[in-house]
């Protein structure tokens, strides 16, 4: 159950997303689709006040869904500050969630890793993303984590654009898809 403090944090995060991240105008998304707006969540996840709220809201959402996990992260770069925020929120509340980063491709030098950070092998993992249109980035992260031996238990995003990512991820990855805010909450059509 969400505490009054987390409810207040969620309300403030929504204000900050509307104020800082929603950019109106024609844009081409990473999926190649065209949209009348862009949600630039790095303007939120990398902002001093919002970053803490992201961690608190995402951690509460995942835990409220009954999902137990030891690591959180996703495909670099959109997921990097989200994973760090969740890790820090967990630490502030006495938890031990680690963060990780999934490279777009496995390194061809050094240790040759695709998943960086504390080892995810044998651990329950939540794949994070700031926002998702087609689910492609999250699915690439799921694949990388699974190759590294991690057990993906959910995918969680800050904003769902309602463009099919939820259905695709649940069908292809076979895990729940959670989101903190839908595009309707942002006043977007």
Image (cartoon, rainbow, N blue to C red):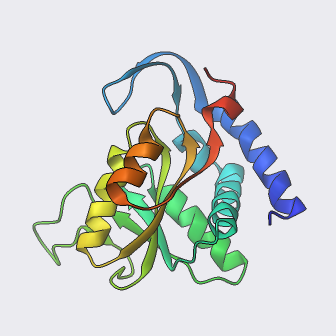
Who's the residue at 86% across and 61% down the image? 5
Q: Position of residue 155 (x, y in %)?
A: 47, 58
The answer to whether 66 appears left or right of 72 in the picture is: right
Q: Quadrant of residue 27?
A: top left
Split into 4 quadrants, where in the image is the C terminus?
top right
Residue at the limit of the structure toward the right, as seen here: 4
Q: Position of residue 44 (x, y in %)?
A: 61, 44
The answer to whether 82 appears left or right of 147 in the picture is: right
Q: Quick check: 72 above or below 180?
A: below
Q: Quick check: 83 above or below 121?
A: above
Q: Nearer the viewer, residue 95 or 44?
A: 95
The answer to whether 175 appears left or right of 92 in the picture is: left
Split into 4 quadrants, where in the image is the N terminus?
bottom right
Residue at the limit of the structure toward the left, as seen here: 108
Q: Nearer the viewer, residue 68 or 23?
A: 68
* Residue 38 seen: yes
Q: Nearer the viewer, residue 21 or 121?
A: 121
* Residue 77 seen: no
The answer to whether 39 appears left or right of 110 in the picture is: right
Who's the residue at 73% across and 41% down the image? 14
Q: Nearer the viewer, residue 43 or 55?
A: 55
């Amino acid at each position: 159950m969400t505490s009054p403090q987390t409810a207040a944090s969620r309300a403030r995060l929504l204000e900050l997303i509307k104020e800082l991240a929603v950019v109106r105008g024609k844009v081409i998304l990473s999926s190649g689709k065209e949209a009348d707006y862009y949600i630039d969540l790095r303007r939120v996840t990398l902002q001093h006040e919002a970053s803490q709220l992201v961690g608190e809201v995402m951690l509460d959402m995942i835990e409220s869904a009954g999902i137990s996990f030891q690591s959180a992260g996703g495909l670099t770069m959109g997921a990097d500050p989200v994973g760090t925020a969740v890790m820090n929120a967990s630490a502030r509340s006495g938890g031990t969630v680690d963060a990780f980063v999934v490279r777009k491709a496995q390194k061809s030098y050094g240790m040759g890793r695709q998943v960086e950070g504390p080892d995810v092998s044998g651990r329950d993992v939540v794949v994070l993303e700031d926002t998702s249109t087609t689910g492609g980035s999250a699915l690439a992260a799921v694949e990388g984590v699974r190759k590294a031996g991690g057990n993906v238990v959910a995918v969680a995003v800050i904003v769902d654009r309602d463009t099919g990512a939820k259905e695709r991820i649940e069908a292809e990855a076979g895990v729940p898809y959670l989101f903190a805010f839908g595009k309707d909450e942002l006043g977007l059509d």
